[in-house]
Amino acid sequence: MLSLNPDDLTAPSPPSSFPAPRIILCTTHISCIFCPPGDSNIIPTLRRQEKPQSVWLLDNACRWVEADLLLAHCISCHADYYPDCVTYRDGGNKRRQRLDMAPQYLRISRHGIWADRRIASLQENALNRFHGGWSNFADWINDSTGARRNLTHRQSQRLFMEHFSRRLLLFHEKDTDFSCGAHPNTHSLSEAVRAAIGVNGGVLGAAMSHGCVDCTHLKRYHSDLIADGVVLGDELNVAGVPPEANTNELPDIPADPAADQLPPLQQQQAAGEGMPRGYTRLAVMDGKTIGCVTHSYLNLKCALDICEGPLVNYKDGRFCDGHSNLRDICGIIPCGRPVRQPGALTCDDLLHIDWQRKYDNRFSWMSFPGVQRVIRRQQADGENSGETGPALRIELGALGETPGNQVVHSFRAKTTYWLQTVHSPQVLAILDRIWAEYPESKPSFIAYDDACSLLRHIVTQDSDSTWLLTTKFIVDAWHYIGHRATDILCRLWCNPAPTNGSQPDLILVAQDDNGSTHQTRAFNTETAEQLNSWLSGFEPQLRQMSDVNYDFFVHVLMMIYAECVQKQVEKKDLGLSEEFWAEATGV
Ligand SMILES: [Zn+2]
Ligand SMILES: [Zn+2]
Ligand SMILES: [Zn+2]
Ligand SMILES: [Zn+2]
Ligand SMILES: [Zn+2]
Ligand SMILES: [Zn+2]
């Protein structure tokens, strides 16, 4: 696959009586990209620098070979043309740089080391398939080639940054405007790219226009249910769950001022004859992602943090910039005493020291998928009924009077945010930010573990919020079955599939072999965990990164994932057909 021929690996050039010609690295531009056409419409052609420079190249067959680097120069504006970029003088007479978006060779070290773009593709595939980061990739290349010359971790990281800077800029359609300081170091390059693509907190434009048969359905009306022979049930029962989970007797619970402010649910009339039917989209959201039912892929990095700020350092950092002074205070809240020594997590109270140690032991072996399984099992057992959203109960000893699971602490930013339910104000801020530029793309439904708390927050904060008109917030069926008994807002507003026909978009009518009909749920909201499990495979790497690298890396993962989703949609023919759009929009 790598075309690795052991005989070819040690020598700089293939041992042959007719050695392959030396590779020449040079720009593909022939004329200057900055200078306007001059006399007789001729754009100044580039001059080549007199003497080629000898460099090392990791070629497309993973061999280290010597090659000739040729630079070109525009004598009119003094732009310099490298094989992978162009440097030029900006208005302020500062040297800047534009990237060539599809170069064959990438410079991976200032000291004359280059790599064929194909090596970057191998690196990308290793990332996608084996979760291999740049260090592992370098080791693997070196192991496989056995060459005396090594690809260093730094060079491998540079290759990663150069390759993915171009991929990300193209993906986010920022390629034509992008420039950065000339000859940036790796950090400045990733920072500049992040600034160009990350301004929306990682909103993928592609996700906003995404639609597939799983998340986007033709609008349905009450008359459709009737036509399908629906047998209606109670408003407070859920379609598609075992009959024993539904009930006709729910306790009376007192009114809720927040629920009273919600606008009344409207029953939509069927579209008139010949009128477009419209369509419905459902987005699924959890602590980390939001997106289409089966393919959630929109990164919400900031939802991960306990506060809105990013961690200064993802390796062992626990706090954002603004909270870094908390490092010196006991991690058990609200103790407030200073830590017993710099770097310690608690004060010198033996109880605190001991509890922190237990906590550490409890978590060190627990992976994210493991945690998810526990949450799911607890939910299925109905242990959580009455609580909002999944809560993982971890058996930790009590601390004094406080039961172990109620101890508030700040020991591990990372692990806590994998587990913690994000609070409604943050979730709303995230939703507002995502759809700020795409207000017309707001989904008709958002399915979310904690939708009832979110809805309560929205209506309490602003009872005129447009969210209340555009979008219905629904919870998971099992959450609903537990919570409808005690929470009036959840009961009346968040049913994911009411059986009384009030939400025809959420219901399908199915017929069994005996010809009797029953209701099923139109969207399956329980399948949105794929991205989380794929992402969690990268957790060890993410944990070791600085904040800029972290952001860049998460952007890369999101892009790769989004592309996989798109391929899957095409391969399985899940795209929305022209007939669908004709019926939905009338055009
Ligand atoms: Zn020029
Ligand atoms: Zn979809
Ligand atoms: Zn953040
Ligand atoms: Zn903070
Ligand atoms: Zn303490
Ligand atoms: Zn609820």
Image (cartoon, rainbow, N blue to C red):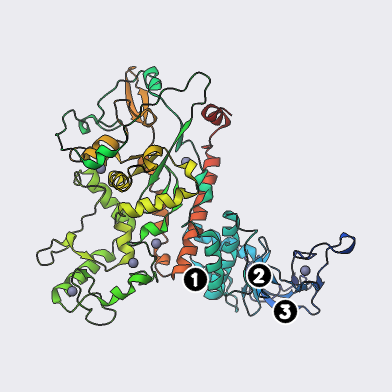
Q: Residue at x 39, y 20 (%)?
A: 223
Does any portion of residue 58 appear in the rendered image?
A: no
Q: Residue at x 17, y 79 (%)?
A: 348
Judged from this view, the residue extending furthest toward the bottom is 341
Do labels 3 and 2 touch, CB within 8 Å? no
Pinpoint residue 372: horizontal percent, then vertical percent: 30, 52
Question: What distance separates the C-alpha of mark 1 from that of mark 3?
Answer: 27 Å
Marked residue nearer the N-terminal end (1 or 2): 2
Q: Which residue is mark 3?
A: 54
Quadrant containing ligand 1 reads bottom right
What secondary structure is found at the residue carrying circle 2? strand
Question: What distance separates the C-alpha of mark 3 from that of mark 2?
Answer: 23 Å
**How would you rate the neighbour count of disc 3 (Cα within 10 Å): few for under 14, some for 14-19, many for 20 or more?**
some
Q: Which residue is mark 2?
A: 97
Q: Between tags 3 and 2, which lies in front?
A: 2
Number of the label disc, if any, that sits on residue 381: none
Marked residue nearer the N-terminal end (1 or 3): 3
Question: What distance separates the C-alpha of mark 1 from that of mark 2?
Answer: 27 Å
The amino acid type, in three-letter code, at marker 2 is: Gln
